[in-house]
Structure formats: C-alpha cells, structure tokens
Amino acid sequence: MKIYNTLTQRKDEFIPIEEGKVKMYVCGPTVYNYIHIGNARPAIIFDTLRRYFEYIGYDVNYVTNFTDVDDKIIKKANEEGVSASEISERYIEEFRKDMDALNVKVATCHPKATEEIEGMIEMIDTLIKKGHAYEKNGTVYFKTRSFDEYGKLSKKNIDDLEAGSRIAVNEEKEDPLDFVLWKPKKEGEPYWPSPWSDGRPGWHIECSVMSRKYLGEQIDIHAGGEDLIFPHHENEIAQSEAANGKEFARYWMHNGFLNIDNKKMSKSEGNFFTVREICEQYPPQVIRFFMLNAHYRSPLNFSRELVEAAKNSLNRILTCVGQLNFLLKNEAWKSEAMSDEERKLYEEVNALQEKFNSSMEDDLNTADAIAAIFEIVKLANTNCKSDSSKEFILAVKDKIVMLCDILGIIAEPEEELLDEEIEKLIEERQLARKNKDFARADEIRNLLLEKGIILEDTREGVRWKRS
C-alpha cells in the first residue's frame, strides 16, 4: 500500500513498525460545540483507512483525542454559568452521536486532555532537563531553535518564520518562535498544580503525550486536516522527538479543506453548517458517501447539487442490493448452483474487487474504489435475473455489501429488532454507562443505529424511535 506522506512529499510504501499491526493517531475535536461538516471529513476519511487496514488483516490501534480544556470551552462555560467540564462532557456525547450517525467506528482509545495532565507535566519536565524548554514567571516555553529539524513537516524555514514574526515589548519569550507548553491560571479558569505554576497545558503538548502513552514513542501514522500541518503537527514533532530522542511518526497524512458552495465555511458568510444540521436534511450515509467520492487530499466543495448527486448514486447501489435480496427472498432463481457462464462472470466480479483493492492501496483513492463497486452493480443489474442461480445472486450481493462495508457504507440494512429486544439493549447500555464501560455503551448505540433505532438521552431517561 502506498500513502502520500506529507513529511517526504511523495507516495511512500506503507511498512508498519511492527509486522501485522498499525498504530494510528488522528487529532480529535475541541469539544465546545457541535462539530461542523468540515470536521466530519477527517473523521470519515481516516475511519475508512482504518477499515481498509482491518480488511487486509492488520490489527489497528486507533487513537483519537478529545481536547476538553481550551479557551473556547472556558468562554462558553462562563457564558452559560456552568463548569468547563460540563460543557466538554455535553459535546463529547454529541460528538459520539454524530460519529454514530456517520458510521464512524469507535476509536480503540479516546483519551481526554484533562485526564492526561500528569503525563504532560512529566514530558515538559523532561524537555526542560534536556535543554529544550524553559520557565518564565510560571509559563513554560519550548525552545524552538533547540530542535534542529524544526520545519521539516511544513517545509518552512525557521529564519523566514522569525522574519515574519512580531514580539511585544513585554514578551517573556527568549525567541519569538518559542511556543507555550504550560501557562499559569487566570481568574475563573480550571487549573492543575505543576512545578512551575497552578495552570493548564498548552494545546500542542497534549497530542504528544497521549500518542506516547497509548501508542508508544514511535507510531506508524499521524493524521488530521491540512490546517494542522503548521503549527500544531510541526510542534508535536519538535516536542516528541526532543523528549523521546527518536522519530515520532513514519507517515503524516492530511486531508484537504472542505468549502461550501466554493467558499470557505464561515459564520459571517452564513454558510457554516454543523453535521447535525446537515443530517436533518440528508441521511448520514449520503454525507459519508459524498465525502468518499473525492480524493481525500483534494479540496472538496459541498453544495446541495453535489450532495443530491451523491444521494442518487448511493441509491443505485442500495436499489441493486434490494433487488438481489428480493430475488433471494422470493426464491426467484432458476437453480441452486452457478453455471459455467456465471462462474466466468463471477471472475469479472473478483477482478473488480482487485480493482477496488488497487485503488484503495493507491493512497486511499476512494473515488476509484467506488467506481469499481458501480461496475459490479452494473454487472449485477444486467446478469442477476430470475433465470440466474441462487449461488450467483448471493455471491454478487455479498461482494457489493462487503466492499461497501469497507467504506463504512451500509448497503444492506439488517432485519428490524422487536421492541422488547430494543428495550433489553437499552437497559444493557444504561448499565454499561453506569459502570463507565463507554466502549460497550457506544457499541450498543452503534448497533441500534445500524438497525434504524435512534436513541435520545433526556432528563426523563432514554427514549428511542425508528428512523
């Protein structure tokens, strides 16, 4: 498999650090509001990469963080007169709902910044002792020039960066390019004790610490939106490699921006949409399918016309699978076993699966992978009739469903659950949440969502409805 590596600026053959295993870190959301449609793109893209890795036999350790302490969170908490943790927990739950709707798999681990403060203090202390950081009046700064390779990801020259920077007269930094690792508390902010001051960490340090804790000092893939290349990911590399003394990540992957009607998404432009708002107008599967119809590194334009086109395209696949199921359910076939002619046709289906695989292994080219699925759909529509064999119809249908599943597209809804089965699963989910087994709780929510059951957590308890 070849992956475009932002670090090398070329497609590199993917070779994992440990055979048969993939260690992936994808930067997660800052949880102060509902996520916008642009946030959905990396979530869907890198979930699809994870699914493909699992399909070809890798054991994937997939970590996505929650930034649950931040200026925006604190500001919203102060506006509402509640604690910052109440804001972050509220929108973590809303994020999970959006990810469920988009059929994004639950991460292997979903660490929160506020639960990893001890590790951040430890790494900052290591950086100070190694001469890569310094403290001034309770603030700790990373000494950017102490890391010789600074700029290697973004290809920015450190002297050019300094020439374009400005430093205030009372600035404490030794160098205008130095960045904050720890800052003292302000009135009304959450804080934690540290050797330097009561305060909280800077943004960049959290991902370095969480990645090291849950994936090790070296990881295979670090991913996120291209807006994170500089300074966030550049600073992560500097911190991690300065502290650990070894290469941080082998492959850096970044998805392109999403525009709305050919304009940058902006509240002032009136074209800012949350995932929740869009999913009220279109099925979440259509949104996912739309996102995968373009190459992940290309800019993507979101418009009603393009989403409608994606909806119609997805319906072609779903209609085909529905027709194949109709033939199978009504025993509308000529014979049980494939004929020689059908076996030759099925060889074409297998060749198209190889085309799907080749596309996915060429830097996750999901657009061409979808094209291969449509070729199978065309073959099915032409050749799966009442004079076909049951074996042929079933094999073609299963192939379409399997390839769609790799993309996170549900091509074959499962049979409806009975009401008593739903209630039993909801009870199990409530018990899991009470026991803080959030992975199982999310798994049950996903299961119910796949079966068309939407859960609503209210003050009066959990309500459910069929979608």
Image (cartoon, rainbow, N blue to C red):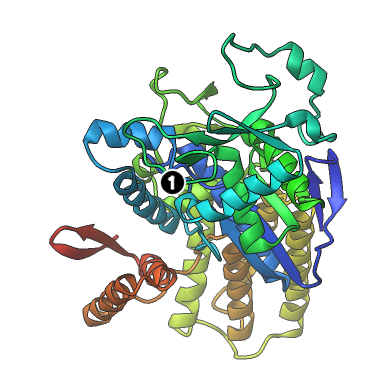
Q: Is residue 132 above or below residue 94?
A: above
What kind of element bears circle 1?
loop
Residue 94 drawn at (x, y percent): 35, 51
Residue 458 drawn at (x, y percent): 19, 58
One can see residue 45 in this view? no
Residue at 25% in and 31% down: 79
Q: Is residue 349 above or below residue 9?
A: below
Question: Left or right: 56 with respect to 68?
Answer: right
Q: Is residue 56 above or below residue 182?
A: below
Furthest-bottom residue in view?
A: 336
One can see residue 232 in this view? yes
Which quarter of the rendered picture does the N terminus lie within?
Answer: bottom right
Q: Nearer the viewer, residue 389 or 154?
A: 154
Residue 161 drawn at (x, y percent): 75, 19
Q: Nearer the viewer, residue 204 or 257?
A: 204
Residue 166 drawn at (x, y percent): 65, 11
Furthest-top residue in view?
A: 169
Crowd tier of the residue under label 1, counting other residues whose Cα lies within 10 Å: few below 14, some 14–19, many 20 or above: some
Residue at 33% in and 48% down: 85
Q: Nearer the viewer, residue 158 or 394?
A: 158
Q: Quadrant of residue 52?
A: bottom right
Amino acid of disc 1:
Trp
Q: Quadrant of residue 343?
A: bottom right
Q: How many marks?
A: 1
Residue at 41% in and 42% down: 191
- The residue labelled by disc 1 is 192
Q: Quadrant of residue 357?
A: bottom right
Which quarter of the rendered picture does the C terminus lie within?
Answer: bottom left
